[in-house]
Every structure is written in C-alpha cells, then in structure tokens.
Image (cartoon, rainbow, N blue to C red):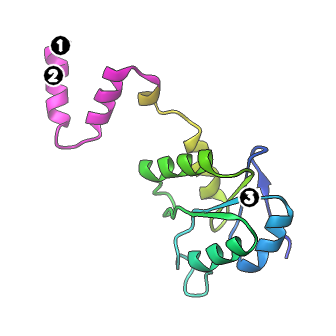
C-alpha cells in the first residue's frame, strides 16, 4: 500500500491511519519518529491498536509516541505533550490520526504561542487564573479594584 503523506515542514509530515505493514515503507522514507493522535478503538475493534503499532515501529528502528486526541476536543495538556515529543524526538516525524487532520492541528497548535506565552508574568498569571473557574470571580474583583 502506498501511504498518503502530507509534508508540513522538512521535519514533520502527516498521514491518515497507518498499519504495522506500513512500517517498512515509513522507515524507507526516512521517518525516525511516529506520533499517533488516534485513540485506540476509535474506529472499532478492527482498528490497529497503539501497542501493535509501537511494536512494529520498534522492529524498524522508529521511535513511537502515543498522544490520543478525541476529534474536536484537543486539550492544552495534549498540545504540550505533543510539543515536548516533537522537540525531543528524532526527525523527521510522521504524525497520524484517522484522516491526518488532528495530526495537522496538533502541529499547528504546538507551534503557535498563546497570548499568555507572549505576555509578561503578570498577564500570564491573569490568563491562567481566568481558566480556573473557582477563582475567576476573585480575579475579576481584583481587576476592578486596580483599574
């Protein structure tokens, strides 16, 4: 089978679902790391599991990282895990999910700084506290007192 790979950068590409039988081709294409963003059993019992892919990747000398992401529910901690995996893994990296969309979105989010990351420490702290529902009212109160 020929893989449908989309090159995002020299170091990162995406693909729809892969299988253990694709590992030889992936290795021949020069990929050193695979990041799987598709949760196990998302496609039913016939979907290849992360464990099976990990074993096949190891047989071909490819590093394998599993960061499952539910469609349309990408979480900040998943983006941070992806960012860390991407920065510390051998390149080039092949990211995949069912269609390749989540793998592309994860890359885009991992390479986009949030407004809090661009801001100074006080603004970053304020942005962080706004996300915490228990103290949102307290932060709003402080802002009105210091406005």
In the rendering, at what x and y percent does residue 16 appear?
70, 66
Query: In this view of the protein, which residue sits in the foreground, 86 or 8?
Result: 86
Viewer-nearest of discs 3 and 1: 3
List the residue tagged with mark 1. 146
Dot 2 and dot 1 residues touching (CB under 8 Å): yes
Judge from the rendering whether residue 134 lies leftward or rightward of residue 27; answer left or right: left
Q: Is residue 48 left or right of residue 116?
A: right
Quarter in which the N terminus is drawn: bottom right
Distance from Cα at disc 2 to Cα at disc 3: 50 Å
Give the main secondary structure of the magenta stretch. helix
Residue 64: numbered disc: none
Q: Is residue 56 magenta?
A: no
Residue 136 percent across, percent down from the top left: 20, 36
What secondary structure is marked by label 1?
Answer: loop
Q: Which mark is residue 142?
A: 2
Vertical order, 9 against 114 (above or below): below
Snapshot quadrant of residue 142: top left
Q: Which residue is mark 3?
A: 32
Which quarter of the image is occupied by the C terminus? top left
Tell me where the magenta segment starts and ends, as one range: 118-147
- Mark 2 or mark 3, whichever is nearer to me: 3
Q: How many marks?
A: 3
């Amino acid at each position: 089978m020929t893989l449908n790979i989309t090159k995002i950068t020299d170091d990162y590409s995406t693909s729809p679902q892969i299988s253990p039988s694709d590992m030889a081709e992936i290795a021949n294409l020069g990929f050193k790391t695979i990041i799987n963003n598709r949760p196990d059993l998302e496609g039913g019992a016939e979907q290849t599991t992360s464990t099976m892919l990990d074993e096949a990747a190891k047989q071909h000398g490819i590093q394998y990282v599993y960061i499952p992401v539910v469609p349309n529910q990408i979480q900040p901690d998943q983006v941070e895990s992806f960012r860390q995996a991407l920065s510390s893994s051998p390149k080039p990296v092949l990211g995949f999910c069912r269609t390749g969309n989540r793998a592309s979105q994860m890359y885009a989010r991992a390479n986009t700084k949030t407004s809090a990351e661009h801001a100074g420490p006080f603004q970053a702290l304020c942005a962080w506290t706004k996300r915490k529902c228990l103290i949102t009212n307290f932060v709003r109160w402080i802002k009105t007192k210091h406005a």
